[in-house]
Image (cartoon, coloured by chain):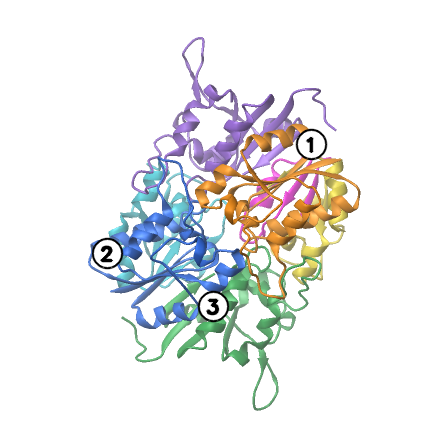
Chain colours: A purple, B green, C yellow, D cyan, E orange, F blue
Amino acid sequence: MNESSEVRNVMVVVRKAPHGTIYVQEALEVMLIVAAYSMNISVVFLDDGVYALKKGQDTSELGSKPFMSAFRALVDWEIEHVYVDRDALKNRGINENELTEIGEDENTGEPVHPQVLSHKEIYKLMQEQHTILSF
Amino acid sequence: MNESSEVRNVMVVVRKAPHGTIYVQEALEVMLIVAAYSMNISVVFLDDGVYALKKGQDTSELGSKPFMSAFRALVDWEIEHVYVDRDALKNRGINENELTEIGEDENTGEPVHPQVLSHKEIYKLMQEQHTILSF
Amino acid sequence: MLHIINKSPFMNSALEDCMGYLGSEDIVLLIEDGVYAAAAGTVKSGLIEKLLEQNEVYALQADIKARGLEQLIKKVKITDYEGFVDLIEQHTPQSWL
Amino acid sequence: MLHIINKSPFMNSALEDCMGYLGSEDIVLLIEDGVYAAAAGTVKSGLIEKLLEQNEVYALQADIKARGLEQLIKKVKITDYEGFVDLIEQHTPQSWL
Amino acid sequence: MKLSVVVLEGPYTHEASDSAYNLIQAALKKGHEINGVFFYHDGVYNVTKFMEPPQDDRHISRRWMELGEKGIDIVVCIAAGLRRGIVDKIQTSNVRISGLGQLAKMILESDRVIVFGD
Amino acid sequence: MKLSVVVLEGPYTHEASDSAYNLIQAALKKGHEINGVFFYHDGVYNVTKFMEPPQDDRHISRRWMELGEKGIDIVVCIAAGLRRGIVDKIQTSNVRISGLGQLAKMILESDRVIVFGD
């Protein structure tokens, strides 16, 4: 029922803001586990989901778990296809350099950044998926 | 801390649509109980909350409890101050005659209808409240 | 793809957000509070009317009946849960939560 | 009255809905995801800027810090939970859920 | 079609649980195979065994238990459950607790996966 | 000021529970009286005793239990609890189950009532 032959394409879509609800936090837990199986995982941040990657989040005063620090190490969990919606950033006045890196390149040690894409590019990726898990 | 001396003014505000979440249903349960205490209760339907009073709702196919029928007897529970936001109706293309009656007058037997009010009138009522319970 | 919308268009942006990611072959299915978007003559009817220029739009019968919606936008197709199953069989679903 | 908004203005209408029911003495307090409305330079900043012409607007510090918001709309007042308590003491609260 | 269903919201509170259940019934009626139901987030609340809804309402955990009885694999996420205090001793029969890996397996084994949530 | 707090959402899932708790702590610090906390809707999930959150996270039912220990009246709505299967035997200590009438009483006795929800 889809193009890919062996390795399944799975996309995790994050549309909600972090902290107000647990959706982003539990989406993160899903990404980390699903990536451990032989699947081609990609993660897309749309709409308020882009706030999940914003630098400088500090939940200490709130008393809740600082789960968002795990986004800085997605690459260590074999999650390398991480995309952010360009319009969502623009609408929220967020510059690309305000987004956290998602890890470092294992060869060069250079920081790896999430890729900023247009609606159209993201839509193309969506169409290639076997499964889309939405949060 | 408020004008009323003895009988407290309590307003229940319903802003969410029925059925998608339990908010309206559990708001109804609150109204019925709070009204049994010596308080001056009013109930206001704003925004998607106005859908709660729409005639012709039939949850049989969904399998969920037809709780909304209780709105037709609010008057029996001593809930007579029931208000609906005019703009909310207009924005949703709902005519007043599509709204359920909330009971019948105990003297005349005539149906009692919720009162349609403007933002300004509703705001005035809000200002007179000791407590506003929002759903 | 099958885009599934379960939020009221009057209070949540899910339907509008979804519309930025629609291929011409894609289908939109309104369920739960999403069916309010299928009502005719509202300030939000324009969203679905615009969608219908290119895409098929379905709305779930059980949810429409539960909400007492009678006047629906023409060309919105009503389906039951079995039709919902068929749509999933034919398209990869994405829920715009 | 103290109007409390806990939803993001980008995806939920709570803030806009509330604005139809504001007296000139009323105060708006942004908490939880509602604090995103206080961010400067967004497509929704105009809502709070308009509010500020007549009303005082507060935003809860713990929620702003949790979300890493740095550039806030000028004249939005930052408060902590103790300030939140003071606001409730002075005004009847209404939560726009 | 082999279908898996993910439920992210709790019973009664959100229609997600009802939509999932009604869809599964329709899929079974049409002869499809339900590969599994995965309860995550507040979805874990769907299977608490002490539920006593009003008499004129549906009994949601019983519905899931009955689906489990028919042999459908009903999985409650352990991480989401532990955080919320929804452990096996307060769950109805015919459901099992397992990790998120089970969701990954469902994805690998299913033709389609659909998510219901808020 | 005598303050009552209504919580409509569950622990971890929604910030409502945290906001309510943090506000109560601040009110106590400033010398106000908390007349009561009323858990309604999914709020009833706040006090399940088997919660085991990750070690680096707050333990929400324990927080409420500790407030109860201090003498604050923590009430779980019986109707909302029964529907969801949250009955007294799975609840933490220092909280009590009661009806919606208790909410009415809190309104009558308090200077202010504030609602936290979704």
Q: In the rendered structure, the residue with mark 2 lies on which chain?
A: F
- Number of on-image labels: 3
The answer to whether the residue labelled 3 contacts the one labelled 2, judged by CB atoms less than 8 Å apart, is no
The residue drawn where x is 70% and y is 56% is C62
Q: Secondary structure at mark 1?
A: loop
Vertical side of A127 occupied by E74: above or below: below
Query: What percent of the width, then of the height, locates residue E111?
Result: 71, 32
Structural distance between the alpha carbons of marks 3 and 1: 44 Å
Residue assigned mark 2: F28
Disc 2 residue type (three-letter)? Leu
Residue assigned mark 3: B30
Q: In the rendered structure, the residue with mark 3 lies on which chain?
A: B
Q: Is residue F115 magenta?
A: no
Q: Is residue D78 left or right of residue F80?
A: left
Residue assigned mark 1: E110
Structural distance between the alpha carbons of marks 2 and 1: 53 Å
Do discs 3 and 2 share a chain? no
Quarter residue F112 falls in:
bottom left
Q: Would residue D89 be visible to someone looking at this image?
A: yes
Disc 1 residue type (three-letter)? Ser
Q: Would residue C31 be visible to someone looking at this image?
A: no
Do discs 2 and 1 share a chain? no
Identify the mark at residue A85; answer none if there is no mark: none
Q: Is residue C15 magenta?
A: yes
Q: Report the span colored magenta.
A: C1-30
Q: Secondary structure at mark 3?
A: helix
The answer to whether the residue labelled 2 contacts the one labelled 1, judged by CB atoms less than 8 Å apart, is no
Query: What percent of the width, then of the height, locates residue D56?
Result: 31, 55
Structural distance between the alpha carbons of marks 3 and 2: 27 Å
